């Protein structure tokens, strides 16, 4: 019986960091009936991925960037004609969002542009592709990506996690968008998204913590929540729900968070920045992301986002001068 395969061309690349002993096919619990072919697999004479970059590391591992995903249908006759492709394509955005969240990789594919299915002969074997030899001159080009490239562990974590549709916090997705915007030098969007992610995260944490403590509506918190002032959420609401306040515990981070929120409001409502807002440049954007990460950390939302040591370099005299390049010249 022929082996049915589906290949998706993605809107952006997916970075992978694979070990020589990693399997070339991985079964995923959220996608029953399918196995994912990793970028180092091939079917007969057909390469299953169009890789944009293939680099062998000195330790023997492989760094690969590809803009395609390929799956093999192992359910066989249980699927009707054409159903396997449309059903899988509907789940692909949630799958990519979850994988992006687990890897904390901002520059990541979000959807499929095209899909194609084919039946390989039953004699075609899924085999390991031959990767290029180690080249010392390419080491610099991969080092900055490896920390947030997809690994076999991420695929295993995806299988053990929540259903795809409920597995990525909104604020986490927005914060990765903010980092992505910074990488692309879209500093205005980076600051806006960093502010939105921070405010959404604070409200989410407070709602979840209160829900865990009480089973009846809380009129005091409801009154605090009705306030549109971000500083109320950081101080009074946090003090009431968490027993601690960002203003009291980390006043510098508190002031930075207010500055970030103020910058967002000025951009949206006034259009012109002021002396008490962030600047719309690399320094302002990096400051926005560092501030968001600090607030995330204080509220216990530490997901290893690529900020410290992975963002754009700033002026040598700036406090953030220690930050290194992340996808930027």
Image: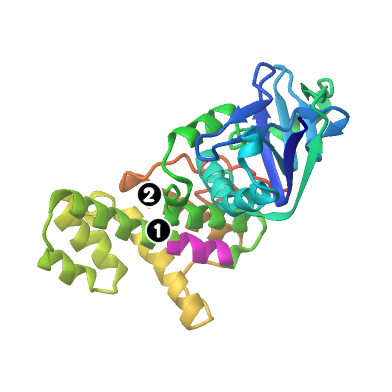
Q: Main secondary structure of the magenta part?
A: helix
Residue 192 versus residue 207 in the image, above or below: below
Tell which residue pokes out farthest to the right in this image: 45
Residue 154 versus residue 23 in the image, above or below: below
Contact flag, marks 2 and 1 (Cβ < 8 Å): yes
Residue 301 versus residue 86 in the image, above or below: above
219 or 272: nearer the viewer:
219
316 or 33: nearer the viewer:
33
Kindly identify which residue carries mark 2: 296
Q: In the visual, does 298 lie left or right of 152?
A: left
Q: Residues within 10 Å of mark 2 (few under 14, many from 20)?
A: many
Which secondary structure, mark 2? Answer: helix
Could you say where residue 63 lies in the image, as x and y percent from the top left?
A: 71, 30
Could you say where residue 41 lies in the image, as x and y percent from the top left?
A: 75, 28
Task: Read off the magenta span.
Answer: 189-196
Q: Residue 222's quadrant in the figure?
A: bottom left
15 or 262: nearer the viewer:
15
Kindly identify which residue carries mark 1: 198
* Residue 54 appears in the picture as rendered: yes
Q: In the visual, does 112 lie left or right of 280?
A: right
């Amino acid at each position: 019986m022929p082996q049915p395969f589906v290949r998706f061309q993605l809107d952006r690349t997916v970075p992978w960091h694979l070990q020589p002993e990693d399997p070339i096919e991985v079964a995923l619990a959220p996608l029953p009936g399918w196995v994912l072919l990793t970028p180092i697999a091939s079917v007969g004479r057909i390469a299953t991925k169009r890789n944009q970059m293939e680099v062998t590391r000195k330790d023997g591992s492989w760094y690969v960037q590809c803009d395609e995903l390929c799956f093999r249908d192992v359910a066989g006759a249980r699927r009707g004609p054409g159903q396997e492709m449309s059903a899988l394509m509907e789940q692909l955005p949630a799958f990519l969002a979850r994988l992006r969240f687990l890897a904390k990789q901002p520059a990541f594919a979000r959807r499929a542009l095209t899909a194609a299915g084919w039946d390989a002969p039953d004699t075609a074997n899924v085999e390991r592709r031959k990767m290029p030899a180690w080249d010392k001159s390419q080491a610099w080009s991969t080092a900055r990506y490896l920390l947030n490239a997809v690994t076999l562990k991420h695929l295993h974590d995806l299988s053990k996690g929540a259903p795809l549709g409920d597995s990525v916090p909104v604020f986490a997705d927005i914060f990765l968008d903010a980092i992505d915007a910074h990488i692309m030098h879209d500093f205005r969007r980076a600051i806006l998204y960093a502010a939105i992610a921070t405010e959404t995260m604070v409200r989410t944490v407070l709602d979840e913590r209160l829900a865990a403590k009480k089973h009846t509506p809380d009129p005091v918190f409801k009154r605090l929540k009705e306030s549109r002032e971000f500083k109320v959420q950081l101080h009074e609401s946090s003090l009431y729900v968490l027993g601690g306040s960002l203003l009291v515990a980390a006043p510098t981070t508190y002031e930075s968070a207010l500055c970030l929120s103020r910058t967002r409001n000025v951009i949206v409502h006034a259009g012109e920045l002021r002396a008490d807002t962030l600047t719309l440049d690399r320094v302002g954007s990096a400051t926005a992301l560092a501030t968001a990460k600090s607030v995330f950390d204080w509220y216990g939302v530490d997901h290893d986002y690529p900020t410290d040591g992975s963002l754009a370099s700033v002026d040598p005299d700036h406090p953030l001068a220690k930050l290194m390049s992340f996808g930027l010249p």
